[in-house]
Image: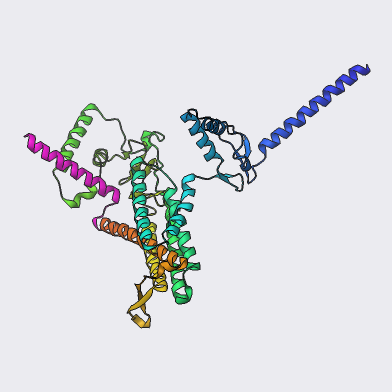
Amino acid sequence: MFLMSAAGLSDFVTAARKSEVAEAKSAQENRTLCCCEYVAQDSQQRTHILACCCNCVDFDLVFTRLVTRRAIDRRNIDSMLIAFQDRLRLPWRGGAKRISPAAVAPAFIVPLMLGLATLNSKTAVVLMLTLVGFTVWGVELAKRTATRTNFFLSWLVFSVLYMVIIFEFQVPLLELAPEENYALMFFSCAALYCLYSTKVLAPLNLVSTQYGTTPKDELPGIAEASSGEEQAEAQITLQMDSVLSLEDDDDEVVDMGMDTAERSGLMHGQPNICEICRKVTPRRAYHCPICGTCVKRRDHHSYWLNCCIGERNYVWYIVGLALSEIALLLGANLTLTSICHPFMVVRPLGYPVLLPDDCSEVFEGFELGISFVVACYALLISAYIAFILTRQAYLWWKGSTLHEFKRASNAAVRNRIWSNWRAILK
């Protein structure tokens, strides 16, 4: 009897311990992540950021094969890079957040290039030209591959941060009036607010009505067409294409920017259906391959803000660019007139307007050299912004968007080439 009771007690204790272990495990799983923990992508287990170099089988294998001079499999290298990218994180509330290498790289590239440019004038010219070429190549590569990246947005943020730091701590502010510094801070903060609003309002430009999720009787104008109606519509579309192909007037930019489906939809009172994302789009809404959806009155995709410029944020974008142009030109002028020998141009209302004259001594010290390089960097950015503003002013005068203008230009070129070949073949 005693043995039976002892066995029953032992089973009870074992069951209680198993229940405690299960409850502890459940509590561990349901516990929120601390600021230094995250869920690993490969094992789906809780991991600490201090263990970033631990238990990486692919890294050990690649390192072993590298030391022993054996062939390394490409799949092991890809898995190692994926693991490193997943483990590169910052402590954050609710769990460590992953850091994109593309977003971190400008934090080191920008100050390195600006610092090297302070060596002498020739190095500054070479690095500035290299910077321009690298930027143009990077933007064109992103356009060609339709890549969504935070690299250019991070480049913009760190460039602004470093320019503010250099201006406030390196430029001799004793040469400046307090009102000039206040004016620069005002235009800078206003420009940053407008550009931030452009980024925040970008999701409101996206088209959300999905074709097929709404019944046909709730979408006016969508009905099954008979074979005769389809033939008549195809004939009308062909006639419109033949007429539009002969028109070379620049005033038809918007109409030439519409594709065949949009023109036929407008003729028959039917809403436009995007052939890529299958969404019901309003007029002048176009598909963005980077965002993966249609954008209302799409102008272009801004890689520097990593968002589309469209109906809801276009005004904020233009105002932000205009204020940025004023802030950059004002900051560059104040910096150059402080470190160089200035001369007075005009004196309106008793306030002197100065321009730099002799900057031959700026590379004799690091403080003056870095201030001069940052001012030239600001002038390069202001020249790029001036080009964008001039282009947008021309498009506004034409009543078109950049997307429509490019489509119209491409269509006009294709029509001219086809007309020339058709004339030759005849």
Q: Quadrant of residue 26?
A: top right
Residue at (39% x, 58% y) in the render:
316
Q: How many marks?
A: 0
Q: Residue furthest left?
A: 426
Residue at (46% x, 72% y) in the render:
181
Q: Looking at the figure, which quarter contains the N terminus?
A: top right
Colour scheme of the rendered structure: rainbow
Per the picture, the main secondary structure of the magenta-coloured stretch is helix
Query: Left or right of 68: which side holds 362?
Result: left
Query: Left or right of 8: which side holds 396?
Result: left
Q: Is residue 171 magenta?
A: no
Q: Looking at the figure, which quarter contains the C terminus?
A: top left
Q: Is residue 29 visible?
A: yes
x then y, percent, for residue 180: 43, 74
Query: Left or right of 395: which side holds 382?
Result: right
Query: Left or right of 17: which side holds 127?
Result: left
Q: Which residues are magenta?
A: 397-426
Residue at (76% x, 29% y) in the render:
19
x then y, percent, for residue 129: 34, 55
Picture layout, residue 132 above or below residue 342: above
x then y, percent, for residue 313: 39, 54
Q: Is residue 310 visible?
A: no
Front-lying residue, 242 or 129: 129
Q: Residue furthest front?
A: 68
x then y, percent, for residue 156: 43, 55
Q: Quadrant of residue 331?
A: bottom left
Residue at (42% x, 55% y) in the render:
198
Picture layout, residue 352 above or below residue 155: below
Front-lying residue, 379 or 288: 379
Front-lying residue, 273 or 107: 107
